[in-house]
Image (cartoon, rainbow, N blue to C red):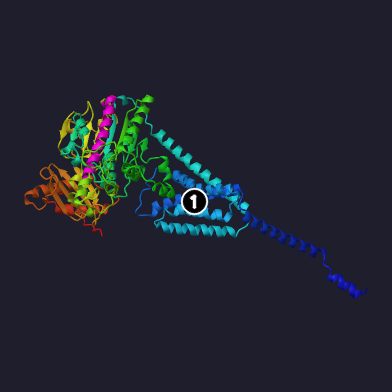
Amino acid sequence: MSLIEFERNVLEEPSSSHIDAERSISRVHGASRRDDRTNAEASREGLSGLASLYWVLAIAVVGAGLDLAATIAKRSFDPNRFFYLMSRHFHWQLPMAAFVVLAIPGLAFLIVAASVGKRPRERVLIGLCVAWAFLEASLRLPIATWSSVILAIGAGACASRLVARRVGAERRARRAGLVAAAGIVCWIGFVCESIYHDIHRSRNSIPVVRSGTARMRNVVLIVLDAVRAESLSLNGYDRDTTPNLKRWAKRGVSFDRAVAPSSWTFPSHASMFTGYWPYQFNVDWKGALKGDFQTTAGYLASAGYRTIGIVGNTSYCSWETGLDRGFERYEDHLETFRTIAAQSSLAAAALDRIPPADVYEAKWRSVKSRDAAAINRLFFNFLAERSAHDETAPYFAFLNYIDAHEPFVTPKNFPGKFGGKPRSPAEEQLLLDYSHLDKSKLTTAQVAFLRNAYDDSIAHLDREIGASLDELDRRGALESTVVVITSDHGESLGEHDFFNHGKSLYWNEIHVPLLIIAPGSAPAGKKVSVPVSTRDLAATLAEMSGSPKPRHFHGSSLSRYWIERPAIGRTARGTRSTAMSVVYGLEEPDPAFGTRVDFEGMLFSLVVDDHHYIRNQSEKEALFNIAADRSEDHNLINDSGNFEILNRLRARLCNEIDDNGILAGIEPEPLEIFRFFLHDRIPKGRRTAAPNRAPARSK
């Protein structure tokens, strides 16, 4: 071999380093091809049972978190939604319900796949689970249901495609399992935190039993939500709707002209609890009790009382309104299997399609609350627990009954007395839809039927209250108990072309029953015909409880009507009581409330002797003589013979507003407008110091 041939052979022969590099590249490509084959085979063969379970649980956990986030976002950013309308434990109950609802279809899919001997494919499983989870959260959005379905399908398809482009299915499944575990741990943490908070709150609320508490009286405040005095035989109604209250009135003091501080639930309750007028803390429909306001429950708890609240109105008496302040135990939203499950939007949609047993069950499903019988059971269970533990501290019980609130439906075992029992599906639907239907379309016969149903609801509630009082009497508990029975507001049933409540201050919406039963403390069978305000109940309960630590509530104790000299220092404002009410009226006709607008903007009303005066911030006024014209058909505002009375009522209203002022009012401008023009109408010599300048009118 020549030298030239030898060199050519050496140059053409690959070196050992080149061989090693080529072998490494070959191994990498081989491994990649093997991974591709493994991934393709896994895609064809499907995920293992454990890997599939990881994915189902992980997506359910993430979906539950998104559902909670969507709920909070809707509450925070939707101007028409100001309450969650759920239990105070919704932050863990809602994710739990959503998790179960989201996990069940995935688990069912795995069971079916296992039963036929096939592994579920990853992209199919993930696509279906993501679509289901996205649907749960998107149903919270203010969009049509079909839009939520389309969005959910799109989200599932995107998730499926994304997974199909990735390798390492088993590795991803293990990571999904870690996500599921972390989510479940967080949920358990929420549950533990909630339980700890409840226990801590109860322990901090347990009062220290001081010396002298044995001489203090138990206090029971019963509020018949939306019960107007005009429909009670206790107050002279020609139908015998309240035979039990009439019977019990013989053992206590009844007030014929009690006036609610407002014509809807929250401000009236807050005023009864604090002694402040509604405009001093809030008069808006989005109201909640905020700020440093001492409540009756808080005061009595600090004096050694055990406190419990049981409310039927879970819309405007729930924990979200702040009315639970000072209560050791507060029962509002039901916490049953159905109500907890219904916190999931998908579960709620399914449960709503299960027909109720009857129209009475349909009512309580719609209001998501408990009836009078259930409230009574809770109350007497509370008393039984006290007896079992030999409890010696007095108690304060607040019971809010919503049975006479619309829908005006009574149970089957109540026969009805006034023709208000529905006789057809159409009448049942009329009762259930009453709150939001167009009232201008109601016929005369339908309005008469609704009034009959309202009277029947009051009669049924009277039976339940009578049974409760009889049981307290049988136990001998009344001898050491102060029982106050009243209402937060009345109801309009076509008077002045108004329906429902909360948008006017006519007599039928602010005139409420008031009965005080306190053997040995209040006289039996006494009637008081002077107009009084239920705002005075805070001062009244503070005094009548016999607490050795009196609290200076605004208002004055109603005991002044049977005691010549009430206990000194028990109230902050002397002995005068003004029967005043405040609310926001309709700005424009609302079919749900009526067919006309009499007053708009901020409304005040004042009842003095036989006269009822109404005024709004744009200077519109009305004057009625409720003794001669109880239905308020004749406005006396232009009657020259009542000019002196009109000016006296204007001055009285002006003085009341000026004396109290604004504390934490959220809308001071309408009040300042109201005050300025009211001052301008009062003759010299009657007016108080007027505002320095005229405020700009609201637009």
- For label 1, count other residues whose C-alpha is less than 10 Å away and answer few (under 14), some (14-19) or many (20+): many
- Asked which secondary structure carries label 1, the reply is helix
| Residue 628 x/y as whole percent | 10, 44
Secondary structure predominantly adopted by residues drawn in magenta: helix
Query: Magenta region: which residues?
Result: 451-478
> Closer to the camera, 554 or 325?
325
> Closer to the camera, 475 or 567?
475
| Residue 695 x/y as whole percent | 23, 57
- Residue wearing tag 1: 63
Residue 110 visible somewhere in the drawing? yes
Q: Relative to residue 694, is residue 7 depicted above or below?
A: below
Q: Relative to residue 332, is residue 500 depicted above or below?
A: below
| Residue 316 x/y as whole percent | 32, 45
Residue 302 visible somewhere in the drawing? no
| 56 sits to left or right of 283 | right
| 674 sits to left or right of 104 | left
Q: Relative to residue 137, is residue 461 depicted above or below?
A: above
Q: Relative to residue 205, is residue 116 depicted above or below?
A: below
Q: Quadrant of residue 598?
A: bottom left
Q: Residue furthest right?
A: 1
Q: Specify the amino acid type for callout 1.
A: Gly
Quadrant (top left/top right/bottom left/bottom right) for the N terminus: bottom right
> Closer to the camera, 481 or 295?
481
Q: Quadrant of residue 312?
A: top left
